[in-house]
Amino acid sequence: MTETTIKKSFFSKFFTTLKQALKGDESFDYTSGSIKKAVILLAIPMVLEMMMESVFALVDLYFVGHLEHSSFAIQTVGLTESVLTVIYSLAIGMSMAATAVVARRIGEKDPIAAAKAGMQAIIVAFVINSLMSIFGIIYAKDILLFMGASAEAAEHGFRFTQIMIGSSLCIMLLFLINGIFRGAGNAAIAMKSLWIANICNIILCPILINGFGPIPAFGLVGAALATTIGRSIGVLYQVYHLFFGNGILKIKIPYFAPDFTQIKALVKIAAPGILQFVIASCSWIFLAQLVATTGGDHGSAGYQTALRIMMFFILPAWGLSNAAATLVGQNLGAKQIERAEKSVYTTARYNVIFMASIMIITLAFGQYIISFFTNDDQVKTIAIEALQIMSIGFIFYGIGMVLINTFNGAGDTWTPTGINFFGFWLFQIPLAFVLAKHFNMGPTGVFIAIPVAETAITLAGIFFYKRGKWKRVQV
């Protein structure tokens, strides 16, 4: 075989696999066949899905960063996103439980049980978010003040916060239903829902913020409206495919009848999963507050700008690592433990390559990336420093994500919960406080604490992965 023929064969196979990944091929059995192909089929749409999730915050950041009083607007968007991480934690925890249970049932060749489990998770989501939405609408201004915003900034931005937290059900459902699709091996639907939501957001953002024809300029509030409408349309797309799609999951109205045995099983997995992400989220909230109180409005805006950009790069890596959750869940369901392990190693290798590339990009071009999102020189200076310091730990972030998704995909949600508790609350928060306050390093001390703690968390994850408890969990 000539070299030209080999190259043609390679590219032909690659583009065929790429087409399958983007289209959503549920005929592929993730419990047999090529592990590399399995990872690619899941990872491509998952990476694109998470890229779209990260685009939400960046689109808002770009448009509000060019408004009058942009430091107030950027700070409001950033602080609100920090609070929303609690809602993201609930959403990720529930979606993770749904992914684990659905993947295990699919691995056992029982799609009806998988569909019923997914619907019970949606019932739980409705109950949780009713309370969250009411709280956010009533106490939006107090939340911003608690987070360290000045009285003027809180007055300027509380309407934005009201809309964003008040629409938390859309966030929850977007994550949760995508988790159901991922567990079933159809990551393409999850990807497409985020693409649709983001396209709507990108179109609506400039229109609702700046006005267009008869549509008035809503300013900062327009960003919240655009994001909420975009997410709602994405959820409608998901619901359509749950009921009328031709995938392996077939949803029927009777599946929505509460099954308290199933709900209890889901909550048992989701509770520590939610807790692990709440622990991480609360740590980020504390760090945001610490930066705001030691760095002022400009320091807070700079940190939030860097954080949004960092999340834009990290979320695709999280998407790639999600492939490990589906593969581990389905292969454990099929009693293929060795194959589950190989899936973890393959996914981790790809994620390290990706995060190493991103680290080089952010270190080399961070200042140019920051300049695109804000025209405030003080904000730029702090944002550049924050991005470059935090990006040093990107490779460890990548490995840690795969390990966390391995534990969660197996249903072993307590292990990463314990790791997060010690890594964030007993290490990262005290370290950031000591560096920022005791050593008078201010925001810089907070920036340093982030990669140091994430590295320690990854090392702990490696230790517990090798102990192998995750292989023996029953779901």
Image: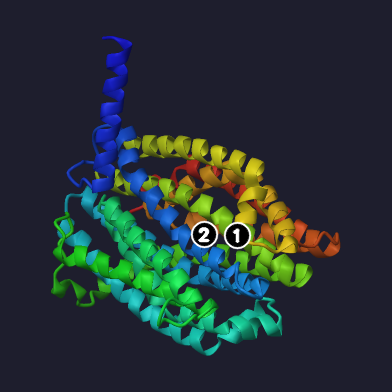
Give the answer, above or below, for where 382 lies relative to 221. above
Question: Neighbour class for label 2 at 10 Å: few (<14), some, many (≥20)?
Answer: many
User: Tag 2: residue type?
Assistant: Thr
Q: Specify whether residue 425 is in view.
A: no
Between disc 2 and disc 1, the foreground one is: 1
Q: Quadrant of the N terminus?
A: top left
Q: Nearer the viewer, residue 383 or 347?
A: 383
**SS state under label 2:** helix
User: Tag 1: residue type?
Assistant: Phe
On the image, numbered disc 2 is attached to which residue?
417
Q: Nearer the viewer, residue 394 or 234?
A: 234
Give the answer, above or below, for where 69 lies relative to 334. below
Q: Quadrant of residue 2?
A: top left
Give the answer, above or below, for where 218 lies relative to 39. below
Q: Residue 118 in the image: state x and y as whole percent.
A: 26, 65
CA–CA distance between discs 2 and 1? 34 Å
Q: Nearer the viewer, residue 207 or 264?
A: 207
On the image, numbered disc 1 is attached to which residue?
373
What residue is at 56 percent from the left and 38 percent from the top?
356
Q: Earlier in the sequence, mark 2 or mark 1?
A: 1
366 with respect to 330 (left or right): right
